[in-house]
Amino acid sequence: MNAVSESSMRDARAREAATTIPVYGQLPFVPDHTSGCEIVANDGKRILDLYGGHAVAALGYGHPRLLAAIREQSETMLFQSNAVALDVRARAAEKLVEVAPDGLESVFFVNSGAEANENALRMACAVTGRSRILAITGGFHGRTAAAGAVTWKSDRWYGFPQRPFDVDFIPRDDCDAARAMIGPDVAAVIFEPVQGVAGAFDLAGDFVRALREQTAEHGALLIADEVQSGVGRCGHYYAIQAHGVSPDILTSAKALGGGIPCGAVLCRKDIANRFGVGDLGTTFGGGPVAAGAIVAVLDTIESEGLLQNVRDREAQIRSSCVVGPVENIQGMGLLLGLVCKQPATAVRDALLEHGILAGTSADPHVLRILAPLVITAEHVEKLAAALASITCEQE
C-alpha cells in the first residue's frame, strides 16, 4: 500500500470514528470505486466481491439496466410519498406478486429487512389477536424491537426493557418440537428458509413443511423471512419455493433494490384486507426511485436467466471448492456456507490476500458466500484456486 492510500484509509477511518457510532468491524481496505463484481480499493488493488455488501449487490456494481432505471426515475420524479398513487410503485408491486410464492397477492413497501419483519410480526398479532411468537434457534431477523425479540441470542444487545410479545424458539429441523410447540395460542412462526447469519444453514424441507402444516392447523400465520435468501439468491425467486410451500407472509429486502435501500412485506389478500388507511405507515417505503430499482432488478433476473446462473454457479462451487481449509458446503444457491477446518476469520483474511472478499458468520468455522447473481465460472475458478493455495501456504 502506498503512502497516499494508507493515509487516505487512516483518514477515512479516523473521520468515521470521530463522527459515527460503530456498526460492524471494518475490513482493512477502503473502496475507491466498484465495477461488475469487483471492488477497487484506494491503493488500486482489485478485489473480487463474493460478499456483495451483505447480499445486497444482486446485479453486482454498475449494471447498466439498474443504473438506467435509477437515473431515469431520479430525473423524472425523485420522490413522492404514499399520499399519491404512482405507476412505478404499481409496477413494482405487480412484479413482486408475479414472482412470489402462490397466494401472496398484496404488498406493503418499507425501507429495510428489519422494518419488513417488524411490520410482519405486528400484522400477525393484529390479525390473530394472539401474543405469542415462535422463532427458530439460530435465526436472525433484525435489531429493532419486534425483529430483535425473535432473533436467537439477542439478549446481549437487545436493549429494550421488555419484548413486545411472548417468544419461544423451536429447535431448528426438529419436526417433533414444531408439532408440540405450535398451538392455538401462537400468532405466528417466523423463520428463514436459509439462516444467513447462522452460516447459511438451510432448513430441511420436512421441517419447513411441518411448520406450514402446524400453523395452518392452529390458525397461526407462517412468516418467511427472505430478507437474505430471496430475490433469486437461492436459485428461485424465493428460497421457500424450493420446498413447494407458500407462507402467509413473506418479507424481502437486501438484494431487492440492488443497492437502493428498500424492503417489502408480501401477504395473502385476506390478511391485507384487515388493514385500512392509517393502520400501516411509511414515508419513504415505496418511493419512486426504490420502486424503479425493484422493477429493474426483477426484470434483469428474468431477462438474463440469472436463476439458472445461480444454480450453475452453486453446482460449480460445490464440486470445486471443497479444497484447502473447506471440508463441507451448506446452504442454497449463492447463499452458501463454507465449513472450514480452521477459524473462518483466518480463511477470510487469507482469501483477501488473494484479492477475494467473503464473509464470516455467527458460526466461527463457517465462511459465507453471498456473491452477486451475475458471477461467472471464471470467478468461481479463482475462488477454488485461492482456497487450494491456502492449504499449500499453511503446509
Image: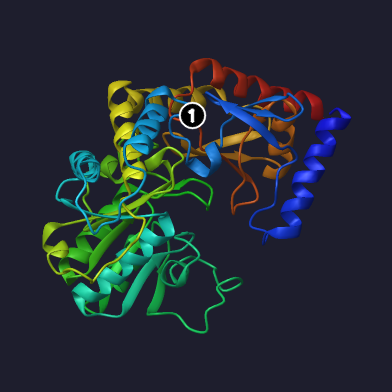
Q: Work out whether 321 lies above or below 13.
A: above
Quarter of the picture containing the C terminus is top right
Q: Depth check: 215 or 66 in front?
A: 66
Q: Position of residue 287 (x, y in %)?
A: 33, 49
Within 10 Å of disc 1 (Cα), the crowding (few <14, some 14-19, many 20+) is many
Q: Residue furthest bottom?
A: 161
Q: Position of residue 313 (x, y in %)?
A: 45, 24
Quarter of the picture containing the N terminus is top right
Q: Position of residue 382 (x, y in %)?
A: 61, 19
Q: Is residue 67 left or right of residue 81?
A: right
Residue under pointer 1 = 60
**Residue for point 25% across, 80% down:** 130
The kind of residue on which mark 1 rests is Gly
Toward which corner of the image does residue 98 lie, by quadrant?
top left
**Residue for point 75% across, 40% down:** 28
Q: Depth check: 371 or 242 in front?
A: 371
Q: Work out whether 392 lies above or below 183.
A: above
Element carrying mark 1 = loop
Q: Work out whether 126 lies above or below 54.
A: below
Q: Is residue 311 left or right of residue 53?
A: left
Q: Is residue 370 visible?
A: yes
Q: Depth check: 222 or 374 in front?
A: 374
Q: Is residue 145 left or right of residue 322?
A: left
Q: Is residue 174 visible?
A: no
